[in-house]
Image (cartoon, rainbow, N blue to C red):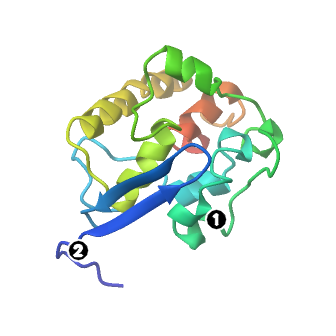
Amino acid sequence: MSISTTKPRPVWIEVNDKMQQGYRYCLSALEGQDFHPDFRPDLSPAEMLALGVFGGKYMTDCRDEFPADWFENARLSPHRRDPSLNWFGVDASQPLSEWRAKGWIYPDDPRGWFQWYCRYYRGRRIDGEDQRQIARWKAIRRHVAQLQANCNPADRWCRPRQRQALLHWAYDSRAL
Protein backbone atom coordinates (compact mmCIF):
# COMPACT_ATOMS: atom_id res chain seq x y z
CA MET A 1 0.00 0.00 0.00
CA SER A 2 1.39 3.39 -0.91
CA ILE A 3 0.57 6.53 1.00
CA SER A 4 -0.02 9.67 -0.97
CA THR A 5 1.97 12.68 0.14
CA THR A 6 0.03 15.16 -1.94
CA LYS A 7 -2.50 17.39 -0.28
CA PRO A 8 -6.09 16.40 -1.06
CA ARG A 9 -8.51 18.72 -2.75
CA PRO A 10 -10.71 20.25 -0.09
CA VAL A 11 -13.81 18.18 0.58
CA TRP A 12 -16.78 19.69 2.39
CA ILE A 13 -18.80 17.64 4.88
CA GLU A 14 -22.31 18.69 5.87
CA VAL A 15 -23.60 17.52 9.23
CA ASN A 16 -27.26 17.02 10.11
CA ASP A 17 -27.73 14.86 13.19
CA LYS A 18 -29.50 15.15 16.56
CA MET A 19 -26.94 17.55 18.00
CA GLN A 20 -25.88 19.55 14.98
CA GLN A 21 -27.76 20.72 11.89
CA GLY A 22 -26.41 22.59 8.89
CA TYR A 23 -22.82 22.51 10.15
CA ARG A 24 -20.19 22.31 7.41
CA TYR A 25 -16.49 21.65 7.66
CA CYS A 26 -13.63 21.15 5.24
CA LEU A 27 -11.31 18.16 5.10
CA SER A 28 -7.98 19.78 4.28
CA ALA A 29 -5.54 17.03 5.35
CA LEU A 30 -5.21 13.38 4.40
CA GLU A 31 -7.21 10.98 6.58
CA GLY A 32 -5.13 9.57 9.43
CA GLN A 33 -2.13 11.70 8.44
CA ASP A 34 -0.64 15.14 8.83
CA PHE A 35 -1.16 15.14 12.61
CA HIS A 36 0.45 17.75 14.83
CA PRO A 37 3.87 16.36 15.92
CA ASP A 38 2.78 16.35 19.60
CA PHE A 39 -0.34 14.30 18.84
CA ARG A 40 0.31 10.57 18.45
CA PRO A 41 -2.78 8.63 19.54
CA ASP A 42 -2.47 4.86 19.90
CA LEU A 43 -5.92 4.12 18.46
CA SER A 44 -7.90 5.25 15.44
CA PRO A 45 -11.58 6.15 15.82
CA ALA A 46 -12.56 2.83 14.20
CA GLU A 47 -10.39 0.91 16.69
CA MET A 48 -11.90 2.86 19.57
CA LEU A 49 -15.45 2.12 18.41
CA ALA A 50 -14.58 -1.59 18.10
CA LEU A 51 -13.28 -1.56 21.69
CA GLY A 52 -16.54 -0.16 22.96
CA VAL A 53 -16.06 3.41 24.05
CA PHE A 54 -18.65 5.59 25.76
CA GLY A 55 -20.99 2.64 26.34
CA GLY A 56 -21.68 2.31 22.63
CA LYS A 57 -23.97 5.34 22.49
CA TYR A 58 -21.71 8.13 21.34
CA MET A 59 -21.99 7.81 17.55
CA THR A 60 -25.31 6.13 16.84
CA ASP A 61 -27.01 9.09 15.12
CA CYS A 62 -24.07 10.47 13.13
CA ARG A 63 -22.89 7.46 11.14
CA ASP A 64 -23.49 9.21 7.80
CA GLU A 65 -20.73 11.70 8.61
CA PHE A 66 -17.98 9.09 8.94
CA PRO A 67 -16.65 6.21 6.82
CA ALA A 68 -18.81 3.09 6.91
CA ASP A 69 -15.80 0.90 7.72
CA TRP A 70 -15.44 2.68 11.07
CA PHE A 71 -18.68 0.99 12.11
CA GLU A 72 -18.10 -2.54 10.76
CA ASN A 73 -16.87 -3.81 14.15
CA ALA A 74 -18.23 -1.02 16.35
CA ARG A 75 -19.88 -1.96 19.61
CA LEU A 76 -22.94 0.31 19.60
CA SER A 77 -26.06 0.53 21.71
CA PRO A 78 -29.23 1.54 19.87
CA HIS A 79 -31.09 2.91 22.90
CA ARG A 80 -28.94 4.16 25.76
CA ARG A 81 -25.40 4.03 27.02
CA ASP A 82 -24.46 0.46 28.01
CA PRO A 83 -21.21 0.24 30.03
CA SER A 84 -21.08 -3.53 29.43
CA LEU A 85 -20.13 -2.70 25.81
CA ASN A 86 -16.99 -0.93 27.00
CA TRP A 87 -13.79 -3.01 26.70
CA PHE A 88 -13.36 -3.07 30.46
CA GLY A 89 -17.11 -3.39 31.13
CA VAL A 90 -17.29 -0.37 33.43
CA ASP A 91 -18.72 3.14 33.20
CA ALA A 92 -15.89 5.65 32.85
CA SER A 93 -17.87 8.58 31.42
CA GLN A 94 -19.18 11.81 32.81
CA PRO A 95 -22.47 13.16 31.51
CA LEU A 96 -22.40 15.76 28.73
CA SER A 97 -23.84 18.29 31.19
CA GLU A 98 -20.63 17.97 33.23
CA TRP A 99 -18.46 18.51 30.15
CA ARG A 100 -20.46 21.66 29.34
CA ALA A 101 -20.23 22.97 32.91
CA LYS A 102 -16.44 22.59 32.84
CA GLY A 103 -16.11 24.41 29.50
CA TRP A 104 -14.75 21.37 27.69
CA ILE A 105 -17.18 21.64 24.76
CA TYR A 106 -16.26 23.66 21.67
CA PRO A 107 -19.28 24.85 19.64
CA ASP A 108 -18.12 23.11 16.44
CA ASP A 109 -17.94 19.77 18.30
CA PRO A 110 -20.96 19.59 20.64
CA ARG A 111 -20.21 15.94 21.52
CA GLY A 112 -16.75 16.77 22.86
CA TRP A 113 -13.23 15.45 22.44
CA PHE A 114 -14.01 12.25 20.57
CA GLN A 115 -16.05 14.10 17.97
CA TRP A 116 -13.15 16.53 17.55
CA TYR A 117 -10.75 13.56 17.19
CA CYS A 118 -12.94 11.82 14.60
CA ARG A 119 -13.08 14.98 12.52
CA TYR A 120 -9.37 15.71 13.01
CA TYR A 121 -8.54 12.13 11.99
CA ARG A 122 -10.62 12.56 8.84
CA GLY A 123 -8.67 15.73 7.95
CA ARG A 124 -10.43 18.73 9.46
CA ARG A 125 -8.10 21.33 10.95
CA ILE A 126 -9.10 24.30 13.13
CA ASP A 127 -6.37 26.66 14.32
CA GLY A 128 -6.47 27.14 18.06
CA GLU A 129 -9.05 24.43 18.74
CA ASP A 130 -6.73 21.68 17.53
CA GLN A 131 -4.02 22.92 19.89
CA ARG A 132 -6.50 23.11 22.80
CA GLN A 133 -7.73 19.56 22.24
CA ILE A 134 -4.21 18.18 21.79
CA ALA A 135 -3.21 19.83 25.09
CA ARG A 136 -6.19 18.14 26.78
CA TRP A 137 -5.18 14.79 25.24
CA LYS A 138 -1.61 15.22 26.50
CA ALA A 139 -2.86 16.05 30.01
CA ILE A 140 -4.68 12.71 30.20
CA ARG A 141 -1.29 11.00 29.97
CA ARG A 142 -0.97 11.40 33.74
CA HIS A 143 -3.34 8.43 34.02
CA VAL A 144 -0.86 6.30 32.07
CA ALA A 145 1.78 7.15 34.67
CA GLN A 146 -0.63 6.25 37.49
CA LEU A 147 -1.33 2.84 35.95
CA GLN A 148 2.37 2.18 35.47
CA ALA A 149 3.12 3.18 39.07
CA ASN A 150 0.26 1.25 40.69
CA CYS A 151 -0.43 -1.82 38.55
CA ASN A 152 1.51 -4.97 37.79
CA PRO A 153 2.15 -4.93 34.01
CA ALA A 154 0.70 -8.45 33.76
CA ASP A 155 -2.59 -7.36 35.39
CA ARG A 156 -4.57 -5.83 32.51
CA TRP A 157 -7.61 -5.50 34.80
CA CYS A 158 -6.01 -3.31 37.47
CA ARG A 159 -7.91 0.02 37.65
CA PRO A 160 -10.49 -0.76 34.97
CA ARG A 161 -12.27 2.63 35.12
CA GLN A 162 -8.99 4.46 34.62
CA ARG A 163 -8.07 2.12 31.77
CA GLN A 164 -11.47 2.60 30.12
CA ALA A 165 -11.14 6.38 30.43
CA LEU A 166 -7.77 6.17 28.68
CA LEU A 167 -9.38 4.21 25.82
CA HIS A 168 -11.83 7.10 25.46
CA TRP A 169 -8.79 9.31 24.79
CA ALA A 170 -7.14 6.99 22.22
CA TYR A 171 -4.51 5.64 24.63
CA ASP A 172 -4.34 1.84 24.37
CA SER A 173 -4.48 1.04 28.06
CA ARG A 174 -4.75 -2.69 27.36
CA ALA A 175 -1.00 -2.66 26.67
CA LEU A 176 0.08 -0.89 29.89
Q: Is residue 72 left or right of residue 82?
A: left
Q: Spatial distance from mark 2 to mark 1, Cα to Cα?
A: 24 Å
Instruction: Pick the residue in front: 32 or 60.
Output: 60
Indicate the quadrant where residue 154 lies: top right
Q: Is residue 39 visible?
A: yes
Query: SS at mark 1?
Result: helix
Which label belongs to residue 8?
2
Query: SS at mark 2?
Result: loop
**Location of mark 1 (residue):** 71
Q: Quadrant of the N terminus?
A: bottom left
Q: Is residue 153 left or right of residue 79?
A: left
Q: Is residue 3 left or right of residue 60?
A: left
Query: In x, y percent, where is residue 33?
Result: 29, 62
- Residue farthest along the front direction in this orientation: 22
Query: Measuring 44% from the left and 40% from the top, which residue is drawn there?
Result: 109
Crowdedness near tag 1: few (<14), some (14–19) or many (≥20) residues, C-alpha within 10 Å: some
* Picture layout, residue 149 above or below residue 78: above
Q: Amino acid at mark 2?
A: Pro
Q: Amino acid at mark 1?
A: Phe
Query: Measuring 24% from the left and 59% from the top, which residue is drawn there?
Result: 34
